Image: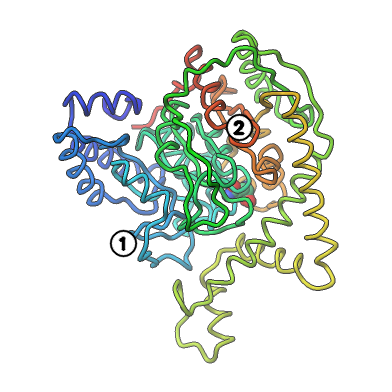
Amino acid sequence: MMWRKSVAELRAGLRQREFSAVELAQAFSERSSRLQKQLNAFVTLTPDRALQQAEAADQLLADGQAPDLCGIPFAAKDNFCTSGIATTCGSRILADFVPPYESTVTRRVFDAGASLIGKTNMDEFAMGSSCEHSHVSATRNPWDLERVPGGSSGGSAAAVAAGLVPFALGSDTGGSIRQPASFCGITGIKPSYGRVSRYGLVAYASSLDQAGVMGRSAEDCAWLLKAMAGFDPRDSTSLEEQVEDYPALLEQDISGLRIGLPVEYWQGVDEGVAASVMEVSRELEQMGASVSEVSLSHADLAVSAYYIIAQAECSSNLSRYDGVRYGHRCEQPRDLADLYSRSRSEGFGAETKRRILVGTYALSTGYYDAYYGKAMRARRLIADDLNQALESFDFLLAPTAPTVAYGIGEKEQDPIDMYKGDVNTVAINLAGLPAIAVPGPLSEGLPVGAQLIGPYLSEARLLAVAHGLQQRTDWHQLRPEVE
Ligand code: GLN
C-alpha cells in the first residue's frame, strides 16, 4: 500500500522503479478524492497538476537527475498562492481567486520535484484552532469524524494522518501547525521566524506567520523543510543564513541533552494529556537527557498579548480585501463606501470580522498605548523568559495543547474558550522560536502531541531529537482507521 510508505521509502521505491511518479500521483489523488466526502480535508483537489508534475518527475528519474522530492506527492494549505490554482484561504472573499504568481515555498517544493495533490482546508485566513471557520465548512478528524482536526492547518493535518499525502505544508502564527499535528497524531514543525520565506503566503499576522511542515515522522518533515527553507530576496524578513541539510543531520549526536519542563505549561492540562507527554519526557531521559523544571514567569500574559498583536496585524493586513482589486465584489454597489462595506460584509466570516473589529479597536488613537503598546511590552518579557530558559536548557518540553481534539461545534459559541486552548503555542511565535510537535501515547484513544521548543535556528537539532525518539518508540506509527 503506497500510501503507508514513508518519504524515504517512496524515494527509494521511485529510484528502484518499484513504482513510477505517475502511479504515486494517481494513487494519492484517488485516495484523496475518495476520502474527501468523509474528511473534507481539501478545498481544491488538483489531480491534473499532480499528473503533469509526476510525468515530468518520471522523466527526470529516467534521466538520473532526480532532485530530492522528485515524484513525491504533497499537499499545500490553501493560503500558499499557487499560480493558476485557486487559493481561497478558507474564505468566501477569495473563493474565486486564482493567483497569477507562485509562493516561494510552493515554487521551491515544485523545483524539488514534488507533485501537488491539492490545497487543504483551513480556518479563514488561518484564524482559528479548529478548522471550523472555513467557507467550505469544517474538516473532520480522521480519528473520530465527530471531532475537529485542530486548526488552522486542520486540512493538512487530517490529510497526512489519513494517508492522503505523505506530508503537507502548513503555516503557524500561534500554533496552527503544532496543535492540529497534535490533534491528528502526526509530526509538525514550525521553523524559526525568517527561516522560510513568507512571499506568497497570504498574510494573517506578519510578525508571527511562519510556514512549516506536517508529516508522519520527523524524518519525513526534514525532507520537505530542506526543500522549502532559505533566504528569499522577496521577503524582507527572510534570513540570510545557509539552510542546514536536515535529513543528513537526523543522526547527529544528541546525547546529554538538558531538557526543561516549563511548569506553567503543565498547569491546567488534562490529566491524560499530561501523562502522555510525561511518557515522552521519560523516554527522552532514557535516551540520556536530564530533565528538570523551569519557570517562565510571564507565561500567563501570552494569550492576551498574542490575541491583541495578531488581531491588530490582521486588521491591517485584511484591509486589502476591499472588493476593488481582487476577491469578492458585491452586486451593484451604490457608491464606494457601499462597495467596501457590502463586499466585506458578504465576503468575511464571523470570526474574521470579530478579529478585524478587535484589532482595529486596539490600534485606534487613544487605545493604542493601552492595548497594542502594552501587548508589545508583554511580548518582550515573554520572549526574554523563553530565551533565558534556553540558555540553561537545550530544549523545553510541554504539552502542545491542554486537551485532545474536541467535538465539532463544541466551542463555537465561546471564542475566548477556544483562544485559551492556544496557551502553550502562542508564546513561541511571539518569540520567533522554532518548535516541533511529536505524537506521544494516545489518551482515551485520541492523539496527544508533545511540544519541543528550541533556541533560534535549532531546526536541525529539534528534528534530530524527534527522530531519535521516533526510532525508539512507535507512537508516531499509530494510524486512524479510515477507508
Ligand atoms: N489559533 C490561533 C489563532 O487563531 C493560531 C492560528 C495560527 O497559528 N494561524 O490565531
Q: Mark on residue 38?
A: none
Q: Report whether residue 446 is seen.
A: no
Is 317 placed above or below 26 here? below
Residue 116 x %, y %: 31, 46
Identify the residue under disc 1.
Answer: 84
- Can you say whether 260 is above or below 90 in the image? above
**Residue at disc 2, CB closer than 8 Å to ligand 1:** no
Label 2 sits on a secondary structure element that is loop
Q: Quadrant of residue 436?
A: top right
Q: Quadrant of residue 85?
A: bottom left
In the image: residue 420, left or right of residue 5: right
Which residue type does callout 1 highlight? Gly
Q: Earlier in the sequence, mark 1 or mark 2?
A: 1
Q: Is residue 50 left or right of residue 349?
A: left
User: Along the line of sight, which residue is nearer the eye, 192 or 133?
Assistant: 192
Q: Which residue is mark 2?
A: 404
Figure check: 419 above or below 184 = below
- The response on whether ligand 1 sits within 8 Å of label 1 is no
| Position in image of residue 164 (x %, y %) | 35, 37
